[in-house]
Amino acid sequence: MAKFSVIIPTFNRAEMVCRCVQSVLDTKWPSLEVIVVDDCSPDDTATKVKEQFGEAVKYIRNEQNSFQAISRNNGARIATGDYLVFLDDDNIVDKCIFQELTKAFAENPKLGLAAPMAIHMRPGKNNVIWSLGSDFNRWTSQPKDHCPNLPIAELPEAPKAYPTSYYPNGFMVPRKVFDEVGGFDEKYIQIFEESDFGWKIHEAGYEEIVLTTARTEHHGFLEPGCVPELRQLGIEKPYRTYCFARNRLRFARKHFSLLQIISVTLVFAPLSAAYYGLVALKNKRPDIAWSYFKGTLAGILGL
């Protein structure tokens, strides 16, 4: 039976990551390795994980706050599984998730990434699907999601699998595929590192799918002081905002054609900076507006 290594990066979310880990252990998969990568949390994450799970979980701590790409790669370095499952810490997984993911890989030797369908379970977005397939508009770099925010009650009975070019929140890859594409590009730091990883798998000739039969509840996390409108846009923190704007252009340069790169850089990026800047200023966050401008400039200059 295939061995799974479930890698869960976390930062300052002790109770949330413990709920996530418990849901993974509750699947009762016979050959399972759970790795919690603590991104230098100032809270009691280490104490709670070790006290609640003991030897059932491998706990490692980054030497400094390094964000998602490095955290995932650090977890992968000590993983011993045939498959790697990357899971955000604000999830509760369904008990049959690994059974369904395993079945998908057994049925398709060309499969390089399989993602469980993420279901939002937070106020304002409750029991709606994140996406049934994710991609980008290559001329604007805007994300394209299939059936975003579809109520779970309206999910069609078929198909059971939807094509995708990447997927956020949680996904499984064979260890050999992870090694072949070189893991996560740590230059992204945060934001777009999942997108880049998925595209590398696609460009290597593998297929990628979202399974409706494998599910996870995404409970989300809103830190104190965050403005919901900015959080929804992914620009709730200055440094995250900087990375978001910069990495959008970095991703385009890495994966789009020359004409598409020109379109994104000369047309969409300035318009995007103006839009996000105005939204930030409307919410009395000039620091967010300034961070987006700086990130856009860094992306244009290739920094």
Image (tube, helix red, strand yellow):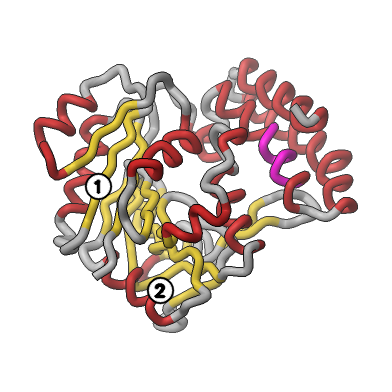
Question: Which of the 4 quarters of the picture holds residue 115?
Answer: bottom left
In front here: 63 or 192?
63
Q: Is residue 216 visible?
A: yes
Task: Give the left or right position of residue 276, taking residue 240 as reference.
Answer: right
Q: How many marks?
A: 2
Estimate how packed mark 1 is, as few (under 14), some (14 to 19) or many (20 or more) residues with alpha carbons within 10 Å.
Answer: many
The amino acid type found where label 2 is placed reads Phe
- The correct choice, above or below, for 79 with respect to 275 in the image is below
Residue 127 image-quadrant placement: bottom left
The crowd level at tag 2 (other Cα within 10 Å; few <14, some 14-19, many 20+) is some
Residue topped by disc 2: 105
Magenta highlight on residue 250: yes
Question: What's the residue type where badge 1 is placed?
Answer: Val
Counting from the top left corner in percent of width and height, residue 171 is at: 42, 57
Q: Residue at horizontal 44%, vertical 83%? A: 158
Q: At which x and y percent is residue 296?
A: 75, 29
Q: Is residue 144 left or right of residue 303?
A: left
Magenta range: 246-252
The CA distance from mark 1 to mark 2 is 20 Å
Q: Pick whichever, 79 or 120, lies toward us.
A: 79
Residue in the image at 21% along x and 63% along y = 95
The foreground one among 43 and 3 is: 3
Secondary structure, magenta segment, majority class: helix
Whether residue 87 sits left or right of residue 113 in the image: it is left
Residue bearing mark 1: 34
Q: For numbered disc 2, what is the local secondary structure? A: helix
Task: Give the mark nearest the N terminus, 1 or 2.
Answer: 1
